Amino acid sequence: MRYKKPQFYDSFHCIAGRCPDTCCAGWQILIDEESLEKYSSVEGRFGTRLLNSIDWYQGAFEQYNKRCSFLNDENLCELYQELGPEALCQTCRMYPRHVEEFEDLREYSLSLSCPEAARIMLSTEEKTKFIETEDTLEEEEDYEDFDLLLFDRLEEARDLIFSMIQNRTLYFSKRMAVLLRFSYEIQEVLDKGELFELNLEDCMNRALEKEEWESLEARFNNMKDMAKDLEKLEVLREDWGKELANLQHRLYDKGEVAYKEIQKEFFENLKYAGKEQVWDIWGEQILVFFVYTYFCGGVYDDMIYTKAVLAVFSVLWIREIIMERCYEQGRLPELELVCQAAWQFAREIEHSDENLNLLEEFFDGSERYMPENLIPGIVYHL
């Protein structure tokens, strides 16, 4: 068994009450069977509270105003305070640590939806590296129907993607465009049953050689249209609904000319302040995160291109939120603001299977997400 993790994975430590938000609100917290059994045997007054604060049918903590029943006014866990860290269920022990399971590989990551994990990830200026170890399992796990040949091919393709994404001699918008074109060609040959005849390096070179054309007009139309898809998703938190309304009002309702002026001012200020390089690095780290977390999952559903679109889509919207907030507040993007936009977006998208599935449907079925329509609107420099 191989194990892989980014170089900053082990540096995470929960900051508890110092966190600007809480991971115990806004989504259902499922409880593993072992913890449920443990909670059912707790005696006394707190045991009674446990019995009354768990949905035993769903196997989840009850929520009040979308907050876990054990989350107090200081955003601290009273179950932890009363019974200690060993009493936490698997979900609470693991988060924001995340693992993707494949037949002979376990890939560990930190969830972008955690404010502290986002800070660690986005304050890392060096290129993300992945540490790999391996051991011998005493007993092999059965992964019936797992297509190991396809997975090996996807892992090879992803390694090429990482090298390209982290090539800082390329405009960052170019890197996003190449990711889309490369993944789209892989999807086409996979659909035809010809993936194993494809030379992946030649495919990457073809994507790199294509000329990009950028259009602020296309950018405005793309983002305005994609905003309609965002509005169709399940809203997990009230403040996210307000954010979508702010984006619509401040960036799109005023029309294309006003949008161009806002974008022009933002990037001129970015350039004047000498923040262009770090802006690209923030985008790079987010893009690497989404590719690392989702791309090889295509082995389970044969949907490769939609995973690439999710990565680009996420970068575009996190940046759009940052631009809107900087415009409203009259400020430049600082790490704190960038992190906040990233984890708020990730909480709405990554922690809802309904939202992830719906986005995949949009990406797979709409012309607006095809490379020739999406790429002209990937503009970040003037």
Image (cartoon, grey):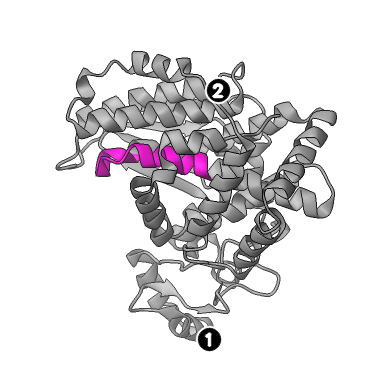
Which SS class for mark 1? helix
Q: Residue at x 51, y 44 (%)?
A: 313
Residue 318 placed where, x, y %? 61, 46
What's the distance in space between the residues labelled 2 and 1, CA to CA? Answer: 55 Å
Image vertical order of residue 22 relative to residue 11, above or below: below
| Among numbered discs 2 and 1, the one appearing first in the sequence | 1
One can see residue 160 in this view:
yes
Magenta residue check for 308: yes
Residue 330 placed where, x, y %? 84, 49
The amino acid type of the residue labelled 2 equals Gln
Residue beneath disc 1: 45
How many numbered dots are placed on residues in this image?
2
The amino acid type of the residue labelled 1 equals Arg
Q: Residue at x 18, y 31 (%)?
A: 192
Mark 2 or 1, closer to the camera:
2
Image vertical order of residue 42 relative to residue 116, above or below: below
Magenta residue check for 125: no
Residue beneath disc 2: 166
Q: Is 202 on the left-hand or right-hand side of 320?
A: left
Specify the segment rendered in magenta: 297-313
Q: Residues within 10 Å of mark 1 (few under 14, many from 20)?
A: few
Q: Residue at x 55, y 23 (%)?
A: 166
Quadrant placement of the N terminus: top left
The dominant secondary structure in magenta is helix
Pointers 2 and 1 in contact (C-beta within 8 Å): no
